[in-house]
């Protein structure tokens, strides 16, 4: 005889339980955008949702996407032409209410000090290390979620 009372179901963590996160990646060079996407991967940390990447090759695309909302994180190429990600980061932070967190990518470690001026939340240095990139993205997304919870809560 089958007894349903004897069955116990244990909760299982599932990627479906986490919302999908939108990460905007900006660079005028497609190979830089591809390097960022590949380094971070679709799931930067087990406690976060999957990542959906939105790529932008121009400043107008970045401004439109961030202004429209729904971007959880922006990763901007500090070496982009004609306007780099550091200047764009500063513009977004000063002009967009509820601006998403921003990570700026750089080619030289010595330029990290410029990220302070750009008001970026974090910096990644090329060549991108996949472990460092995923950890940095996860940390910034967690801090942003904690801040959102504190403000709303």
Image: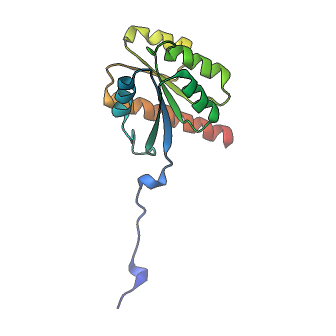
Residue at the extreme bottom: 1
Q: Position of residue 56 (x, y in %)?
A: 49, 28
Quarter of the figure that contains the C terminus: top right
User: Does residue 119 appear anywhere in the picture?
Assistant: no
Q: Is residue 39 above or below residue 1?
A: above
Q: Nearer the viewer, residue 36 or 65?
A: 65
Residue at 42 percent across and 82 percent down: it is 4
Q: Nearer the viewer, residue 133 or 70?
A: 70
Q: Quadrant of residue 144?
A: top right
Q: Position of residue 30 (x, y in %)?
A: 38, 25
Residue at 35 percent across and 24 percent down: it is 31
Residue at 49 percent across and 46 percent down: it is 20
Q: Nearer the viewer, residue 142 or 80?
A: 80
Q: Is residue 16 above or below residue 149?
A: below
Q: Position of residue 112 (x, y in %)?
A: 44, 12
Q: Nearer the viewer, residue 131 or 35?
A: 35
The reply, left or right, for residue 61 in relation to residue 131 is right
Q: Position of residue 78 (x, y in %)?
A: 46, 16
Q: Quadrant of residue 100?
A: top right
Q: Quadrant of residue 66?
A: top right
User: Does residue 121 appear anywhere in the picture?
Assistant: yes
Quarter of the figure that contains the N terminus: bottom left
């Amino acid at each position: 005889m089958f007894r349903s009372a004897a069955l116990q179901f244990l909760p299982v963590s599932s990627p479906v339980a986490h919302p999908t996160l939108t990460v905007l990646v900006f660079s005028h060079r497609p190979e830089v955008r591809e390097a960022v996407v590949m380094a971070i991967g679709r799931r930067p940390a087990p406690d976060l949702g999957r990542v959906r990447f939105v790529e932008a090759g121009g400043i107008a695309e970045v401004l439109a996407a961030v202004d429209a909302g729904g971007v959880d994180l922006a990763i901007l190429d500090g070496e982009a032409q004609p306007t780099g990600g550091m200047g764009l980061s500063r513009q977004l932070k000063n002009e967009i209410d509820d601006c998403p967190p921003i990570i700026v990518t750089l080619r030289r470690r010595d330029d990290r000090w410029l990220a302070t001026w750009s008001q970026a939340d974090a910096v990644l240095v090329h060549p991108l290390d996949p472990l460092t990139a995923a950890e940095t993205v996860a940390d910034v997304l967690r801090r942003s979620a904690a801040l959102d919870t504190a403000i709303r809560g």
